[in-house]
Amino acid sequence: MKLSKIALTVIVAAAVATPALRTIAADSAKDSGPYLTLDAGVNIMQDANTVDSSGKTGKAKFDTGWRVGLMGGYNINKYVGVELETGFIDNGLKDSDRWIGTIPMLGNVVFRYENASGFVPYIGVGAGGAYSMVQGGGGDDQSDFVFAYQAKAGVAYEITPCMAVDIGYKFFGTADEKFGGTKVKDIYAHFIGLSFTFKF
């Protein structure tokens, strides 16, 4: 008799819980999935310290430039996503025809807070590498590949369940870079721009 009551209780509990579990699974599926993000905006590089082959120190100063990016990611749930990012960063050297271009290759983790308002604040961190090149001005072209990292934050607005637009900020830095006989240290950049995200 006890076993039949237990069995009946389990069956009733399963029958009651099944619709709720299906709803949770559906919501989870809706909040997860792949996405593609395109961004573009202004890139401001801080003055960097330089050391030449003789040990003489100096400063590298940069004009305001631009940055474009492409991110392919996957939302694990409504709060966390992971993504791969690349793109191109361009800044000219002040009072020079030479410029520095950088291709970031980063893996990011993004934390966001989805809510009923449609505005979704987010923060993220990333790490990987950066391929940088100095070109133009009649000088020898130089390049280097080093460790890179970034932090980002912003607010997105969901236009539709599958599309969002946001304004965001990125702090980007790299390890010391060497171009010819000159080492460039303390390389930091600040990006402010707009992005569009498409969910699949």
Image (spheres, rainbow, N blue to C red):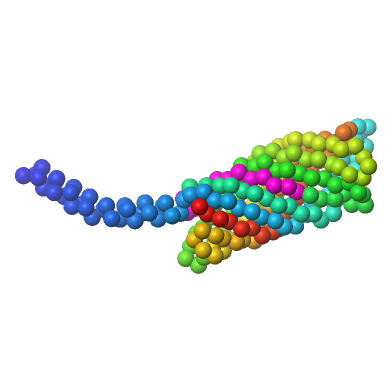
Residue 195 among those drawn in magenta: no
Q: Is residue 54 left or right of residue 29?
A: right
Q: Is residue 150 left or right of residue 90?
A: left
Asked if residue 104 is positioned above or below residue 166 in the image, the reply reads above
Asked if residue 117 is positioned above or below residue 64 in the image, the reply reads below
Closer to the camera in the image, 150 or 85: 85
Q: Say whether residue 109 is visible.
A: no
Q: Which residues are magenta?
A: 77-89
Q: Residue furthest bottom?
A: 117
Q: Is residue 166 left or right of residue 176?
A: left
Q: Residue at coordinates 60% horizontally, 53% vertically from top-left?
A: 37
Closer to the camera in the image, 89 or 125: 89
Q: Residue furthest left?
A: 1
Residue 83 among those drawn in magenta: yes
Quadrant position of residue 148: top right
Q: Residue at coordinates 85% horizontally, 47% vertically from top-left?
A: 99
Position of residue 126 measured from the top left corner of the image (x, y, whole percent) = 63, 44
Q: Residue at coordinates 10% horizontally, 42% vertically from top-left?
A: 3
**Magenta: main secondary structure:** strand
Closer to the camera in the image, 187 or 55: 187
Q: Give the number of marks.
A: 0
Position of residue 2 measured from the top left corner of the image (x, y, whole percent) = 9, 44
Position of residue 45 measured from the top left corner of the image (x, y, whole percent) = 79, 51
Q: Say whether residue 70 is visible.
A: yes
Closer to the camera in the image, 31 or 58: 31
Quadrant, the N terminus: top left
Position of residue 12 measured from the top left corner of the image (x, y, whole percent) = 18, 52
Q: Residue at coordinates 87% horizontally, 38% vertically from top-left?
A: 141
